[in-house]
Amino acid sequence: MYKVFVNDKPIIVTSSQQKDNNFPVYILKNIVFEEIVYKLKNNLLEGVNLYVQDLDAGWQQLLQNIKVVSAAGGLVLNDKKEVLFIFRNGTWDLPKGRIEKGEAIEETAVREVEEECGIQNLKLIASLITTYHVYFEEKIKLKETFWFLMSSNFKGKLIPQLEEGITEVGFKSTAEITKALQNSYKNIELVYDTYLKM
């Protein structure tokens, strides 16, 4: 299954006929993607299931209709197993950014975390999950973000990248994360839940 979020409302691309939600089901090849996005964006739908027999073929078909922007980021742990969060544009988030031409995904993830948080000594541990969300910049775009589990023993002062709209950066305990996720994005919950299941 693939989940694409539009303002935190899910488009679930699936080949399973089992349904674990109350969202309407459409056949992927019969839909106009822009119409689905419009309905989700304007609260006419709370979510939607797009059914396809061959999941990978259906996903590729969907991607043909939309410009994909690739990014990478990290869920960073410190020595106390706290998680590094940023506060950007009034919302708690994890550090991430666009992949530059000629850059490996892992390089982007490390660079973006360093730039957005002023942290050093990052160590890549594992690949976590790839998340997807739709945003609007002239026309509909799909951001795919490759997330990595990282650690750091950095003890210096963390510095938010103000020019990227980041006003706070810091490590959060489990209780603080639970609170932060109430003012975050569904994709960030997905990343955190994936980490917890590892």
Image: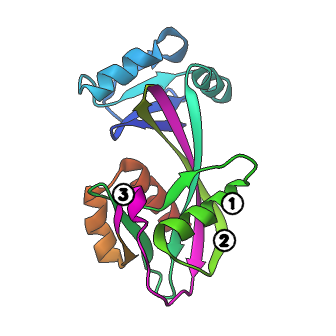
Residue under label 2, please give it. Answer: 124
| N-terminal-most mark, 1 or 3 | 1
Is-magenta flag for residue 11?
no
Q: Residue at x 51, y 22 (%)?
A: 51
Q: Quadrant of residue 59?
A: top right
Instruction: Please give the label number shown on residue 165.
Output: 3
Please, what is the three-letter code of the amino acid marked with disc 1? Glu
Against 144, is 173 above or below?
below
Label pair 2/1, CB-CB below 8 angstroms: yes
User: Which colour scheme appears in the figure?
Assistant: rainbow
x and y percent of residue 73 in the render? 55, 59
Q: Residue at x 41, y 59 (%)?
A: 163
Q: Which residue appears farthest toward the right when viewing the image?
A: 102
* Residue bounds of the magenta highlight: 139-167
Disc 3 and disc 2: Cα gap in Å? Answer: 25 Å
Q: Secondary structure at mark 1?
A: helix
| N-terminal-most mark, 3 or 2 | 2
Which callout, 1 or 3, points to the residue nearer the camera? 3
In front of the other: 100 or 153: 100
Residue under label 1, please give it. Answer: 106
Against 84, is 101 above or below?
above
Label pair 3/2, CB-CB below 8 angstroms: no
Against 82, is 194 above or below?
above
Disc 2 and disc 1: Cα gap in Å? Answer: 8 Å
